[in-house]
Amino acid sequence: MFSLIEREKISHLELVPTLLIRLLNESLLKEYNLSSVRIVNTGGQKLQPEVKRSTEELIPFHSDAQSSDHSTSSILSQYLRRIRHHCF
C-alpha cells in the first residue's frame, strides 16, 4: 500500500481507525515518501488522541475528518465541505 501511495502521489486516504493504526505500526512505513497525503478521513469508530498524534507526526500537514458513519455519502459531504472552504 505504501508503494502505491508513493508512486501515485495519493493525497486522500479513507480509512477506519483500525487500518490507520495498523499502517502507523508498520515497520516499513518510514521507508516511503508519503508527503503527498494531505487528508486522512476516518470513520466507523472514534479516533483515539494518540492515533491522531501519531498521524500528525507522520503527515505534518494533513487535515483529518472523522465520521461516525463511514458511508460514502458522509465521506463525500465532508470532502465537499473542505473544497468549499478552500475555494471560496
Image (cartoon, helix red, strand yellow):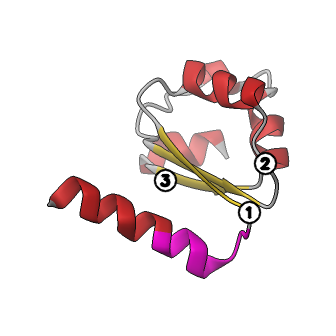
Tell whether 38 sits left or right of 31. left
Element at label 2: loop
Residue under numbered circle 2: 46
Q: Amino acid at mark 2?
A: Lys
**Which residue is painted at 17% across and 59% down in the image?**
87
Q: CA distance from mark 3 to mark 2?
A: 19 Å
Q: Nearer the viewer, mark 3 or mark 1?
A: 1
Please say if the residues under marks 3 and 1 sit with CB atoms less than 8 Å apart.
Answer: no
Which residue lies at the image location 62% right of the left edge and 78% below the top edge?
Answer: 72
In space, the residues marked 3 and 1 are separated at their CA atoms by 18 Å
The residue lying toward the viewer, choosing from 11 and 4, is: 11
Single out the residue that lies furthest toward the bottom.
73
- Of the residues shown, which amino acid type is indicated by label 3? His
Q: Which residues are magenta?
A: 69-77
Sequence-first disc among 3 and 1: 3
Q: Secondary structure at mark 1?
A: loop
Label 3 sits on residue:
12
Q: Is residue 56 above or below residue 62?
A: above
Q: Position of residue 81 (x, y in %)?
A: 37, 65
Location of mark 1 (residue): 68
Local crowd size for mark 1, using a 10 Å CA cut-off: few (<14), some (14–19), many (≥20): few
At 50% from the left edge and 33% from the top edge, which residue is drawn? 34
